[in-house]
Amino acid sequence: MLGTGTPVPHGERAGAGVAVVYNDEAYIFDVGAGVVERATQASERLGIEALSPTNIDHLFLTHLHSDHVLDYPELLGTYWWRRQDQLKVFGPEGTQAMSEGVYTMLAADTETRLKDKSPITNPDAARAAVTEITDTGTVFEEGELRIEAFGVSHGDWDRAYGYKVTTPDKTIVISGDTSLNKEVERQAEGADILIHEVISRSGWKELPEQWQAYHQYAHTLTDELAGLANTAQPDLLVLYHVLHYGAPIESALEEVQRDYNGEVVLAEDLDIFD
């Protein structure tokens, strides 16, 4: 778990970011603020070399909210001159335009590094190879690993995605940001790990009515998630991107456990699940 936070800044939780590491290759899902720092920590402290920023070659974006993309310039700009390969980025419509904005932001930096550093491993690595997702289904497949995108319901986003990662060893489903969604339930049925966002109901119910309506429109309440998990029955349910408002963050875990007796954990940054 490279980032378990929300748009609300938190000193112990980076923005949204999940790494699936398979055959010593890292596949990153979202890159919120602080995620590159967490990846560096995972590489240096936990010995996961695939998460050294220059070794990360694949990024998948659920949607383009700030807390899911703010470290995109950081990932592109970190030691790009030492990269063997371009960063391959998969995301919704708008990902290419966002990338062009990053290139403009870093244009002077890129120009001077191209002049100053010789040799540069791969000059093209200053830019990403972007694939915009126009339909659901398999978006990446390599060897025995397959990554599928599926549509989720996140407020007014026309295209927001969750992802299903399938290997011979594991099936992992990442919800991204979503209100209660039957497609997430379908994709997560029998999964080894379901990583899902959640709202603490006890915190949510103290909000003004208009904010209750907004957050339920875009996110999943604890009892709703418990119901989904009871149907899907993943081996492990991992809670991240926890909106808890004035309630303790642990309230989200306690509320899910009240209605769901499967294995469920509240994720912290740098937690590992295997």
Image (spheres, helix red, strand yellow):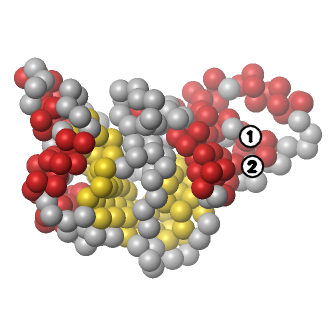
Amino acid residing under circle 2: Arg
Q: Position of residue 26 (x, y in %)?
A: 57, 58
Marks 1/2: CA–CA distance:
7 Å
Using the image as rendered, state which of residue 109 and residue 99 is in the foreground.
Answer: 109
- Identified by mark 1, the residue type is Tyr
Quadrant where the C terminus lies? Answer: bottom left
Q: Are marks 1 and 2 in contact (CB under 8 Å)?
A: yes
**As drawn, 157 above or below 235:** above
Residue 48 to residue 115: above or below: below
Residue indicated by mark 1: 79
Q: Position of residue 10 (x, y in %)?
A: 41, 29
Q: Residues within 10 Å of mark 2 (few under 14, many from 20)?
A: many
Task: Report which quarter residue 193 is drawn in.
Answer: bottom left
Pointer 2 residue:
83
- The numbered dot on residue 156 is none
Counting from the top left corner in percent of width and height, residue 244 is at 23, 34
The residue sitting at 49% across, 71% down in the picture is 145
Number of labels in the image equals: 2
Q: In the shown orientation, is residue 133 left or right of residue 244?
A: right
Q: Is residue 98 above or below residue 163?
A: above
The secondary structure type at the circle numbered 1 is loop
On the picture, is 5 further left or further right than 263? right
Q: Is residue 60 visible?
A: no
Q: Nearer the viewer, residue 218 or 231?
A: 231
Element type where label 2 sits in the image: loop
Image quarter of residue 16: top left
In the image as oriented, which residue stretches furthest toward the right?
118
Vertical side of 192 occupied by 183: above or below = above
Residue at 10% x, 26% y is 206
Sort mark 1 into few (<14), some (14-19) or many (20+) by Cα contacts within 10 Å.
Answer: few
